[in-house]
Image: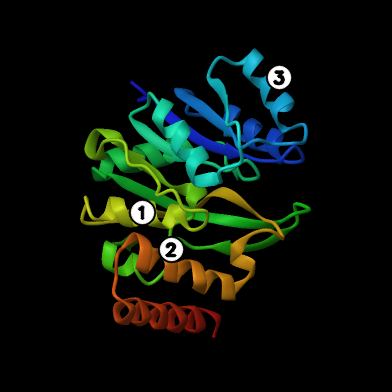
Amino acid sequence: MEQLVSIITPSYNCSDFIEETINSIINQTYTNWELIITDDCSTDSTVSKIQKYAQKDSRIKLSQLKSNYGAGIARNNSIKDAAGRYIAFCDSDDQWTPDKLEKQIKFMQENDLALSYSSYKVIGEDGTDQREVMAPQRVTYRTMLRNNYIGCLTAVYDTLKLGKVYMPEIRKRQDWALWLSILKKTPYALGIQENLAIYRDRSTSISSNKIDLIKYNWNIYRQVEGFSRIKASFYIIQFLFYYLKKKL
């Protein structure tokens, strides 16, 4: 019997992409899911497009925030309402391959995992192919401190093993902070090397600005993990080392 999967989607002014996202979930070969979208006070036609889908499919549920709070709080609002054993994440401009849930839930059950993730493809804002991001086979809390190796659109965690785990209420890198929190509760997470999702790299993405990325990493080390300045500096140096090594 398929376990219910709760798919967590924050939305904000994504009317150009939200239909592709929802369609990729509707087309899943694994059918026991609920899509919980929390709209973060969109000012375009995002909400009306979501409502059309929700009226046709009872598995799609929409919640609306009264102010713009950021993706982390929007995701937490959806997690709060989630009824599924598994919590999965898909942002409102990303997509899944049709067999994503089927393969990943089977992978988690066969390996008795609390957290899993996969490789994914990156496309541009216009939909053109850019590159692939290969998932590491295994991550631990220690290795994840170097950088975020888990694409949010690929992650799934098991509430039966972990309970509901929420993101910290920060504007950026809150997904990385969530994986660190989970990896304090479980010794490791495993990744599927196959591309099971499609990430849309938009001009507003923090990954396009490495200076900002360093700043947000520093905030995770200091504010969320509570590291001293010396320890935080050590991990910033590690991040830069592994980033440059990857580029070279």
**Residue bearing mark 2:** 148
- Residue 44 position within the rendered picture, expressed as x and y whole percent measured from the top left: 77, 35
Circle 2: residue type: Asn
In this orientation, which residue lies closer to the viewer: 66 or 133?
A: 66
**Label 2 close to label 3 by CB (< 8 Å):** no
User: Could you say whether the residue bearing mark 2 is in a helix, strand or loop?
Assistant: loop
Q: Residue at x 56, y 39 (%)?
A: 10
* Residue type beneath disc 3: Lys
Q: Is residue 100 visible?
A: no
Residue beneath the point at 29% across and 75% down: 228
Residue named by callout 1: 179
Where residue 11 appears, x then y in whole percent?
A: 62, 38
Q: Residue at x 44, y 22 (%)?
A: 32
Q: Is residue 85 above or below residue 59?
A: below
- The residue drawn where x is 47% and y is 28% is 30
Marks 2 and 1: CB-CB under 8 Å?
yes
Mark 3 or mark 1, earlier in chain: 3
Would you place residue 137 above or below residue 37 in this image? below
Q: Quadrant of the C terminus?
A: bottom right
Outermost residue toward the front? Answer: 67
Q: What SS does tag 1 mark?
A: helix
Compared with 157, 171 (above or below) is below
Cα–Cα gap, marks 2 and 3:
35 Å
Residues packed near mark 3 inside 10 Å, few (<14), some (14 to 19) or many (20 plus): few
Could you tell me the amino acid type at mark 1? Trp
Pointer 3 with pointer 1, Cβ within 8 A: no
Q: How many angstroms separate mark 3 from mark 1 (CA)?
A: 33 Å
Q: Earlier in the sequence, mark 2 or mark 3?
A: 3
The residue where tag 3 is placed is: 52
